[in-house]
Image (tube, rainbow, N blue to C red):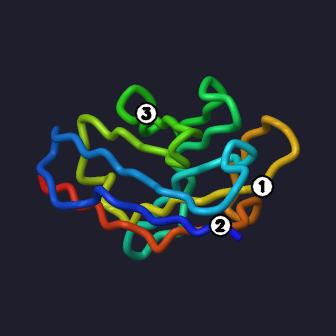
Amino acid sequence: QVQLVESGGGLVQAGDSLRLSCAASGRSFSRYAMGWFRQAPGKSREIVVAIGWSVGNTYYIDSVKGRFTISRDNAKNTVSLQMNRLKPEDTAVYYCAAALTSSDRLRRSGYEYDYWGQGTQVTVSS
């Protein structure tokens, strides 16, 4: 069993930065593929970024490429999402998710993830 706790959300202005963190409990964190999802009001949940076992194995949706960076620290059981040049359309509840995997393979769909955090609100004003 893994518990995920997100932190770092808030209210910012367009162009500002935020750093979200996700702390994971449990063992074998390095064997989990991790992802950040978001859900805006009235919209479906969507994946934002994902990372495999290795820090270089990452996936970003087009709308955040060049602005967001995902990273993980297996020694600290954390995964972070650095969000720069935020836009109003980034406003959403952001969720951290974990998937126990047997290989360094990304997970891009919500149904592939086993554990979810409670979410943290990110609001970007124009």
> Residue 100: which numbered mark, if any?
1
User: Do the CB atoms of the residues marked 1 and 2 lie less than 8 Å apart?
Assistant: yes
Question: Looking at the figure, which quarter contains the N terminus?
Answer: bottom right
Say which element carries label 2.
Answer: loop
Which amino acid, by three-letter code, is at mark 1? Leu
Task: Indicate whether 39 appears above or below 58.
Answer: below
Disc 1 and disc 2: Cα gap in Å? 10 Å
Label 2 packing within 10 angstroms: few (<14), some (14-19), many (20+): some
Label 3 packing within 10 angstroms: few (<14), some (14-19), many (20+): some
Say which element carries label 3.
Answer: strand
Q: Position of residue 97 (x, y in %)?
A: 59, 59
Q: Where is residue 52 in the image (x, y as percent from the top left)?
A: 69, 38
Q: Provide the residue designation for mark 2.
A: 2
Give me the residue at 44% from left, 44% from top. 80
Give me the residue at 53% from left, 38% from top. 72
Which amino acid, by three-letter code, is at mark 2? Val
Disc 3 and disc 1: Cα gap in Å? 22 Å
Q: Provide the residue designation for mark 3.
A: 69
Side of 14 where 83 appears, left or right: right
